[in-house]
Image (cartoon, rainbow, N blue to C red):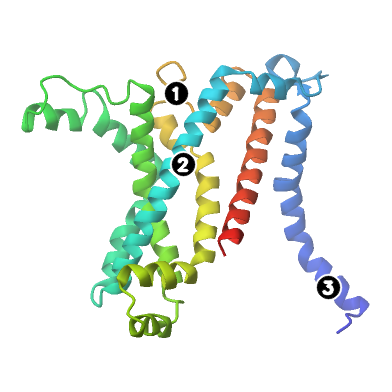
Amino acid sequence: MKLNRESKIQIGVLLLPGLLVFGIFTFYPIVRLFWMSFFKWDFGSFLNQDFIGLENYRTVLSDRNFMTAFANTLVYTIITVPAQMILGLLVAILVNAVSRFKIGFRVAYYLPVITSWVIASLIFRYVFNTEGLLNYFLTNVIHVTSQNIHWLDSRWGGMAVAMLLGIWKGIGWNMVVFLAALQTVPLELYESASLDGAGGWQKFVHVTLPGIKGTVLFALVMLTIGGFNVYTSTKLITDGKPGHDTEVVLTWMYYKAFSNGKFGYSAALSFIIAFVLAILAVVQFKLMQNKE
């Protein structure tokens, strides 16, 4: 149906507030940030910025600390994303199979998701601190060791604690997503598989996984983006220590912008990460299409 002129004006008026909010608070900051990435922009150049082209990008890519932060972020994502998805899918299958207390199980597994990242990070830092609860339990309760273990004083020790927190908080979200997907798989397919002599594992591989493949792709892409956006947990648990060895890309970006005043550097860094995420998303979509 063709819209008359009055209807088009009415639609435009209704869309205008949302478009203005999107343009002011989303589109303009992105464009402005991209423009900043080509200038020398720091505490000393607020009023007069020099155009330096791709120099900020070259500085980022040649920065050893950025490479460390990028490697930490990549390892964090590679470990936490599959762990969250596998454990979340396992919990979803178990909850979907029980006939009683389904709501109670859902609430119990979803509680970590709604727990504040700040509160959870501070608790994990207290537990794994050198003088924390875990070391007290190991040394004074079960006497496994006579000396406190420095969990957070090494690169991979601190990253392991942050990854453990990320997995713990992500299981509940994956459970909800996969539980909704499992309930859309037709029961007739499982009945047909049983008549063909398929066992539990064969049903899972040939019926369940193909039936929820779209949800698996959605979770994979969203969790990958979330993995590269990790900030609060590493900032509060290790704060980049020791010697920036536990930095991730967002904590390093924050440090360069608000501690060193390198806003042009941070702007370039943000677009490098956005480009990497775009490539990863395309690769994930292609791999899922090929598996189909």
Residue 235's place in the image compared with 281, above or below, is: above
Q: Earlier in the sequence, mark 2 or mark 1?
A: 2
Which residue is at 75% across, 17% downward?
45
Q: Quadrant of residue 4?
A: bottom right
SS for tag 2?
A: helix
Instruction: Give the label, 2 or 1, closer to the camera.
Output: 2
- Say which quadrant the C terminus sits in: bottom right
- Which element carries disc 1, helix, strand or loop? loop
- Where's residue 57, x and y in %? 71, 25
Locate residue 98, reporting x and y percent: 26, 73
Residue 71 is left or right of residue 32, and the answer is left
Q: Residue furthest front?
A: 197
Instruction: Give the number of the disc on residue 240.
Output: 1
What whole-number distance in Å separates the C-alpha atoms at marks 2 and 3?
A: 48 Å
Give the mark, 2 or 3, whose residue is nearer the N terminus. 3
Horizontally, is 105 left or right of 167 in the view?
left
- Mark 2 closeness class: few <14, some 14–19, many ≥20 residues within 10 Å: few
Q: Nearer the viewer, residue 18 or 178?
A: 178
Q: Nearer the viewer, mark 3 or mark 1?
A: 1
Disc number for residue 10: 3
- Residue under circle 2? 78
N-terminal-most mark, 3 or 1? 3
Please say if 268 is above or below 184.
above
- Locate residue 182: give its quadrant: bottom left
Residue at (29, 73) in percent of width and height: 97
| Left or right of 8 in this view: 22 | left
